[in-house]
Amino acid sequence: MATRKTTRKTTEEKPDFETALAELEELVERMEKGELSLEDSLRDFERGVELTRFCQQALKEAEQKVQILSKDGGEGELQPFDDGD
């Protein structure tokens, strides 16, 4: 049985977006190796789903804030982001 690095947070803890994304990336890497037991894989998959939902919600909220802040007096149109390319 493979040894695991345990950095999993409990479901009660709310990580910030960057922490959640880093943990999700770690889970994916660990699962891609294919060395986990079925039980460990399912547990990691479940945590991955939780983290994905958390990240999606955080991105949705950030997008809503950007839309609100981008409005010109509440009536302006959103402008596309120009990254300078």
Image (cartoon, rainbow, N blue to C red):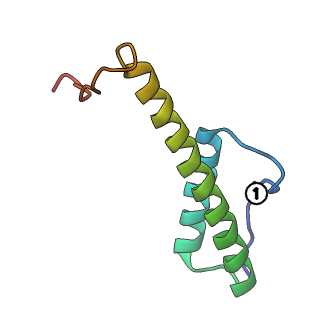
Residue furthest left in the image: 85
| Residue at (22% x, 25% y) in the render | 82
Residue 67 percent location from the top left of the image: 41, 29
Residue 85 percent location from the top left of the image: 15, 27
Q: Which of 14 and 42 is in front in this view?
A: 14
| Residue at (53% x, 51% y) in the render | 56
On the image, which quarter does residue 7 sit in?
bottom right
Element marked by disc 1: loop
Number of disc labels: 1
The correct choice, above or below, for 55 with respect to 3 in the image is above
Q: Which of 35 and 50 is in front in this view?
A: 50
| Residue at (26% x, 27% y) in the render | 81
Q: In this view, does 56 lie to the left or right of 48?
A: left
Residue furthest bottom in the image: 38
On the image, which quarter does residue 66 sit in?
top left
Q: In this view, does 4 lie to the left or right of 21?
A: right
Q: What residue type is labelled 1?
A: Arg
Disc 1: CA contacts within 10 A as few (<14), some (14-19) or many (>=20):
few
The correct choice, above or below, for 67 with respect to 17 in the image is above
Residue 59 percent location from the top left of the image: 51, 42
| Residue at (73% x, 74% y) in the render | 43
Q: Which of 9 and 30 is in front in this view?
A: 9
Residue under numbered circle 1: 8
Residue 3 percent location from the top left of the image: 75, 71
Q: Nearer the viewer, residue 17 or 33?
A: 17
On the image, which quarter does residue 44 sit in?
bottom right
